[in-house]
Image (tube, rainbow, N blue to C red):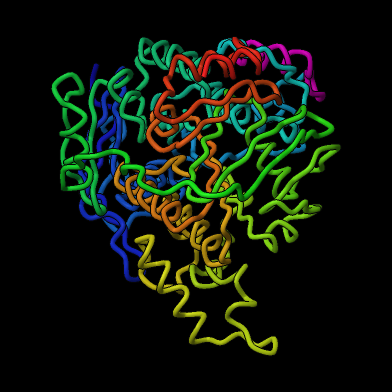
Amino acid sequence: MGKILELRNITKEYPGVKALNRVNLEFYSGEVHALMGENGAGKSTLIKIISGAIKPNGGKIIFEGKEYDEMNPVLSQKLGIGVIYQEFNLVPELSIAENIFLGRKLTNGLTINRKLMNEKADELMKSFGIDVDVRKPVKTLTVAYQQLVEIAKTISNDVKVLIMDEPSAPLTNREIDAMFEIIEKLRAKGIAIIYISHRMEEIFKISDKVSVMRDGEYVGTKLTKDTSRPELIQMMVGRELKEQFPEAKSEIGKIVLEVKNLSTPTLLKNVSFHVCEGEILGLAGLVGAGRTETARAIFGADQISSGEIYVRGERVQIHKPQDAIEKGIAYIPEDRKKHGVLLEMSVRENTSFIALKKISKAGVVDKVKDKKLAEEYIDKLKIKTPTMEQLSKNLSGGNQQKVVLAKSLASDSNIIIFDEPTRGIDVGAKQEIYHLMRSLAKEGMAIIMISSEMPELLGMSDRIIVMHEGKVMGEVSGKDATQELILEYASGGYGKEEASNEN
């Protein structure tokens, strides 16, 4: 089909940063065009310019042959451009159906036709293979289900160009397959799809073309069938990445954290496990298994109904996050926007936020120590920022995640819970975080890693605990773990005793 969208010499500058430098791209109807690049490459800036969320400093946007110097949200939506961002744009208090049809009229005269709205919303959600009560408030949903609502909300409009920014990040394999089926239907209808993802397997499965950006510049476009994973990685990072996961050489020491029969009022049922010095313990399971709930309960963010938590052999009472921090436990949450980074504060302020006692004397912050701490972690984590005073909201998603990590490390924690540590992070940045996690383990830290990415679990974990519906189903050593075994446990295929006997 014909060309529907063209970008000519698109440029965007911020103080001290050239986010986009004369980018040229073309998109065609009926094609899935993947867009790849490291965090900070300019992908998010580009799609915000297409959707009208921000204005370029130069260049042209050509839609269906008509030139525009810039877009605005009303115009882009009117033209038929829809965007699914990494960060959700939902109203928590409203129902699923109300969110999907927010701003559109489904009425009987002057009143809202809620029956019709609920029926249409239910039909959309079932097209994902998801059976959920569309009258439920969005705030009661998991991240995965909120993502599905966001997708349904966007495609319910008559779109001609659909931009999907890391849409699969919180989804299970079954939900991803259902989403791909919808993409195929949209492609068959002639809709152009711009698909942004760091998951290579998705790119090769769903896209027709793939374009790569690096440091705000366009690198090149390949037909997906004619390229390879090593070639795309080299285009993205400008170098060959010979290894994906660092070798595990840390010495496993004494038990640092032990959880016994941990239960919560809503989901967890007698969860028990331990993690040792120098160990990376993987926590596996499908969406709804209770992995994040376990982390939040240990960190004091969620109420515990029964069970015990021990730190270095001592039973501790953790009722709130501050209690956990004082015991040396840090939690890096899955949703960095909502629970991690303080968007309106600078990189420096975020880094020292939890560590104020360490850099203060008599209640007064030592500004020299404050700056030195920020400089240390900006350098250590390779945070891309023009200055340490840059507001965190102006950083790319991957660099925001690094700021959350810096904040946790600066608090001198020795037990760190990573919840989806590389969600929405590019290949190069993943390498940095993997090496950092392994170096922390070598220093004797105990790490719990929750991950939905099977290669990450298998490549990084010394040991893996698998959960299903709030229970621990099995434990597998890192060297013996296979994708098939973990998925068997995760789907409830083995009980705890069978899992133990298997290994």
Q: Is residue 70 above or below residue 185?
A: below
Would residue 234 be seen by someone viewing this image from the given angle? yes
Identify the main secondary structure in magenta.
helix
Whole-percent x and y of residue 371?
47, 80
Q: Residue at x 49, y 39 (%)?
A: 86
Residue 148 visible: no
Q: How many marks?
A: 0
Q: At x 60% / y 47%, what residue is drawn?
A: 255
Q: Is residue 464 left or right of residue 235?
A: right
Residue 115 is covered by the magenta coloring: yes
Which residue is painted at 25% across and 41% down in the image?
7
Q: Is residue 96 left or right of residue 345?
A: right
- Which is more toward the observer, 391 or 25? 391
Question: Which x, y percent locates residue 277?
Answer: 53, 50
Q: Is residue 134 magenta?
A: no
Numbered range of the magenta stretch: 108-125
Say whether residue 247 is left or right of residue 373.
Answer: left
| Quadrant including the N terminus | top left
Residue 14 higher or lower than 186, as above or below: below
Q: Nearer the viewer, residue 317 or 352?
A: 317
Q: Position of residue 27 (x, y in %)?
A: 26, 29
The location of residue 229, given as percent across then percent down, is: 21, 29
The residue nearer to you, when weighing 34 against 233, is: 233
Residue displayed at 46% across by 48% down: 53
Name which quarter of the figure residue 298 lies in. Answer: top right
